[in-house]
């Protein structure tokens, strides 16, 4: 059994323990295995071990490796977890099952056009910039609830959830708590939060999915 597979099972065990610790039902947290920068040879053993939900940061990179793997394993669910440029909306709608990084009107409008054109609707999350970091994607927290409402009312989206990436140098707990509060206010069911270093904390704050890369695949 390769390192990635062993680490995958270790992460699954830690998720199960964190669910129990938080008094949550087993299996309520989805593991999104972040496979960016890794190729099919690295990812395939983890698929063979049973993982079916994966996250990619870049549309172009995902296009190079996932169509063949999705052809071999049709039940794979592919998440876009990196910033989406409007000129990549067509490819993103065609390839991804979930787009977690809707964060501005221009992207929402572009996605609405492509979904109507292709007749294929990925599940959509709104990314919130909980730390209000100027260099980071995501809508400002104070605008998030109104933006979710606009996505529903203007573009006809059923927004599934919210996503955040807390500042690297801050305690993630308050950011997870903020996202959970905004999720309730916006009336969404899902919260994508928590990465390799803090996913157990995120589960305690109500994460429904965690995005784990290096703890499974190792450093890039």
Image (cartoon, rainbow, N blue to C red):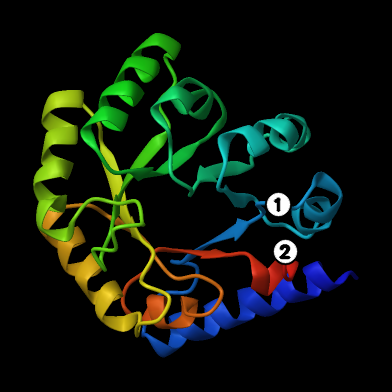
- With 139 as the anchor, is 21 left or right in this view? right
Quarter of the image where one finds residue 219: bottom right
Mark 1 or mark 2: which comes first in sequence?
1
Q: Is residue 117 above or below residue 197?
A: above
- Give the image location of residue 92, x and y in percent: 50, 29
Using the image as rendered, state which of residue 158 and residue 25 is in the foreground: 158
- Element type at mark 1: loop
- Element type at mark 2: loop
Name the residue rendered at 57%, 43% in the picture.
Answer: 77
Mark 1, residue position: 37
- With 8 as the anchor, is 2 left or right in this view? right
- Give the image location of residue 113, x and y in percent: 32, 16
Q: Is residue 197 above or below residue 91?
A: below
Q: Quadrant of the N terminus?
A: bottom right
Q: Is residue 24 visible?
A: no
- Give the image location of residue 151, x and y in percent: 19, 34
- Give the image location of residue 109, x and y in percent: 26, 24
Q: Which mark is residue 84?
A: none
Q: Are marks 1 and 2 in contact (CB under 8 Å)?
A: yes
Mark 2, residue position: 220
Name the residue rendered at 35%, 57% in the picture.
Answer: 135
Name the residue rendered at 40%, 81% in the picture.
Answer: 169
Alpha carbon distance from label 1 to label 2:
7 Å
Q: Is residue 112 visible?
A: yes
């Amino acid at each position: 059994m390769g390192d990635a597979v062993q680490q995958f099972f270790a992460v699954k065990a830690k998720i199960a323990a964190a669910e129990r610790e938080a008094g949550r039902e087993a299996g309520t947290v989805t593991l999104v295995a972040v496979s960016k920068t890794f190729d099919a040879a690295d990812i395939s053993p983890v698929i063979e071990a049973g993982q079916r939900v994966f996250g990619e940061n870049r549309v172009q990179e995902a296009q190079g490796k996932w169509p063949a793997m999705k052809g071999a394993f049709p039940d794979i669910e592919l998440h876009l977890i990196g910033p989406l440029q409007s000129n990549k909306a067509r490819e993103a709608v065609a390839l991804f099952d979930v787009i977690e990084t809707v964060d501005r009107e221009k992207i929402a409008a572009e996605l609405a056009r492509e979904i109507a054109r292709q007749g294929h609707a990925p599940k959509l999350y709104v990314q919130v910039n909980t730390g209000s970091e100027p260099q980071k994607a995501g809508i400002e927290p104070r605008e998030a609830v109104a933006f979710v409402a606009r996505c529903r009312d203007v573009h006809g989206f059923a927004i599934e959830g919210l996503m955040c990436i807390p500042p690297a140098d801050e305690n993630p707990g308050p950011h997870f708590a903020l996202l959970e509060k905004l999720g309730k206010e916006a009336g969404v069911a899902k919260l994508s939060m928590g990465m390799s270093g803090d996913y157990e904390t995120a589960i305690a704050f109500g994460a429904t999915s965690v995005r784990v890369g290096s703890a499974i695949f190792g450093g890039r």
